[in-house]
Image (tube, rainbow, N blue to C red):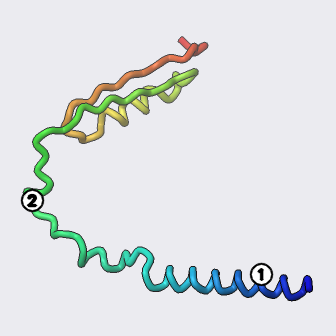
Amino acid sequence: MLLAEMEQILLGLMVLSLGTWLFLLLFWGQFWRVDQLLKPITPTTNNFTFLPRICIIIPARNEADFIDTTIKSLLLQDYPGEVNIFVVDDQSREY
């Protein structure tokens, strides 16, 4: 009796696994067809008239050795919109 129930459970799991693999193989994603589904990019589709303001918050605690490198790196970014950088000191012991 117990062996028959175990065989039924095993058979059910095998059928479920086979069905899952068949679904993934035949229908899931189809990422290889993306080039056929997307519209071609033209210069007018990337013409941004409004760029949002970006606020960068840097939490810093005992970061005196690295904070200048971090800020210089952020200032070198080429975002054409407005950028605000805030450094928040969290009870540093360095002055």
Of residue 55 and residue 72, the one placed in the foreground of this image is: 55
**Relative height, residue 20 to residue 70 (above, below):** below
Q: Quadrant of the N terminus?
A: bottom right
Q: Residue at x 29, y 37 (%)?
A: 76
Q: What residue type is disc 2 on? A: Pro
Q: Residue at x 16, y 69 (%)?
A: 40
Mark 2 → mark 1, Cα distance in angstroms = 58 Å
**Relative height, residue 11 to residue 34 (above, below):** below
Q: What residue type is disc 1 on? A: Ile
> Which x, y percent locates residue 67?
46, 26
Of residue 25 and residue 80, the one placed in the foreground of this image is: 25
Q: Secondary structure at mark 2?
A: loop
Which disc, if any, is residue 43? Answer: 2
> Which x, y percent locates residue 68?
43, 27
Which disc, if any, is residue 36? Answer: none
**Relative height, residue 43 to residue 18 (above, below):** above
Which image quadrant is residue 18 in? bottom right
Position of residue 16 in the picture relative to residue 24 (left or right): right
Which image quadrant is residue 72 in? top left
**Relative height, residue 43 to residue 10 (above, below):** above
> Which x, y percent locates residue 43?
9, 59
The residue carrying pointer 2 sits among few (fewer than 14), some (14 to 19) or many (20 or more) residues within 10 Å by Cα, namely few
Q: Secondary structure at mark 1?
A: helix
The residue carrying pointer 1 sits among few (fewer than 14), some (14 to 19) or many (20 or more) residues within 10 Å by Cα, namely few
Q: Residue at x 86, y 88 (%)?
A: 4
Q: Residue at x 57, y 21 (%)?
A: 62
Which image quadrant is residue 90 in? top right
> Which x, y percent locates residue 50?
14, 39
Query: Nearer the N terminus, badge 2 or badge 1?
Result: 1
Q: Which residue is mark 1?
A: 9
